[in-house]
Amino acid sequence: MNKQEFTKAIRSGDHKFHLDNVVITTNDQKLTGKGSLEVKANKFKIFVTLPSDSKPPLMTAGIKMRKDFWAIQGLIENEIGFIAHSLPFSRVEHYASGQPSTTLQFSTDRLELLPEGFECMTSKEVQAMHQEVSRQAGVVQTAPENPRLEDVTESAIIQARFHAILPGFKLIERNGGTQTKTSNSFLGDSMSYATDTFQCELENWKCGLVEREGDLHAHLISKPGFESLGQDREQKVFHAFLHALAFIHGRHTWPFSVEHRQDEKLVLHSIQLNDEIAASPHSPFSQALAFFNKTKSLGWNFQNVLEKAFIFFKTGTKLTHELERLLFMFREATTPGVPKRISILSLSSLLESLVRAVFEEKIEPTTQAQDGDFKKAKNAVCEELKAKKDETHTRLASILANAEFMNARMRYEAVIQHLGLPLDEKWKDLFEVWRDARNPLSHRMSGGGDSDQSIKDEIVAESKIAGAINCMVLKLMGYSGYVRVSTVGDEYIQI
């Protein structure tokens, strides 16, 4: 069994595989054994039977962090090397042939497949090996069929290459496709063409997004002259690319598999089993926009927004990390099946969090002097009220002591203006929608009811708040152009 057969078997349903040469590395010892790997209910279940003289450590109570996980390494079907990280969730003591033994059971949703054969070598190493074999055999070298064996210059070497498979992911825009030739003994030859690809360049990278059998194959390949950033930094760049795709399409980009190569040497091949992947209906763009862009020449450019999102997430600042988490929760909160009131409450909190994050990172540093003057005046008034020494003035002083330089409306309007959005009726009304949608849910659940009008108001409020979040994030990325501000009526504006 090779890797391709193994990954195909995983995708097709529940399977069981034999494990050999298993080594378990705990915090303070190594254990050896053999067992099996089961794929069931989107989990890898690993069963390892230890020799009779093994003494695995007992699991202590308490919270376990990722650093406490054990490493399980071995061979699948005696051919495919793997490594996984987990903690045993079950331990069974039993006897085999009169000897006591222990079976540990692990559960994880992620495996790393180890490189083998030519995967362990760079293109230069493969070329050198080929030349040495040819020299020893006395063969006159000709142009090899394998492109990896060609004489290449330093600038032509692909320093970094990523390939990820995103299950069930549909592109909103395509600018290329696949041409297929078929031949039949009776009908003869025929050609077909499928528009299933988007390709472009993003800074130092070539991007290829190809739809295949219901999945999206995402490729990110370094351009000539690219200097390797190291394995960790390159993977952060690829994750930024996935975050950009997720935001634009309103869907988590959780790959089933990821391959990372440096100069054709495989440095990472991970397999991830995922449950249902959240997909929000409130994506900032849609296939309808892409269609009308082509038929009516709207001037919208998918590559432009993809590049701006990619560059934004690639910066890796505190704000971008906050937005990665915020947009993750955005998609989770608005995926179909989540009750509307939970969605609205979540979106209202996320909008407030976004406003605060932008204000504190971009605006607050410029208002420190004014904030200082405000605090001085507030403290002076509080002291004057307290000097009255009666209950009414003391209570008023206590309330005033909690006053901030900017309230929620002022922060919201400051952020809108900072982002270059017009503080017109649309954005002023949005604040009222946010306030009305949030407060009844935050303070009392009795308002609204289940009338048709109430349900309609909740749908409209969710759509408008989601659209506002998308607009603000796009402006942070430096984007200008068409964006969907409401899924109700599929409403678009230019920002």
Image: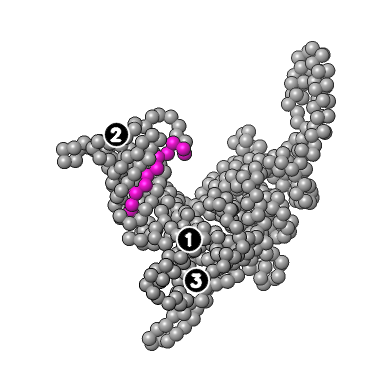
Place residue 355 in its image quadrant: top right
Foreground of the two, 120 or 185: 120
Residue at x 43%, y 58% (from the top left corner): 120
**What's the distance in space between the residues labelled 2 and 1, CA to CA?**
41 Å
How packed is label 2: few (under 14 Cα within 10 Å), some, or many (20 or more)?
few
What type of secondary structure mainly makes up the magenta span? strand
Residue carrying label 2:
55
Residue at x 72%, y 60% (from the top left corner): 481
Residue carrying label 1:
122
Q: Earlier in the sequence, mark 2 or mark 3?
A: 2
Residue at x 63%, y 51% (from the top left corner): 313
Q: Would residue 280 be found to the left or right of residue 275 on screen?
A: right
- The kind of residue tagged 3 is Glu
Q: Tags 2 and 3 in contact by the CB under 8 Å rule?
A: no
Magenta region, residue range: 66-76
Local SS, label 2: loop
**What's the distance in space between the residues labelled 1 and 3, CA to CA?**
13 Å
Residue carrying label 3:
150
Local SS, label 1: loop
**Can you tell which of label 2 and label 1 is closer to the viewer?**
1
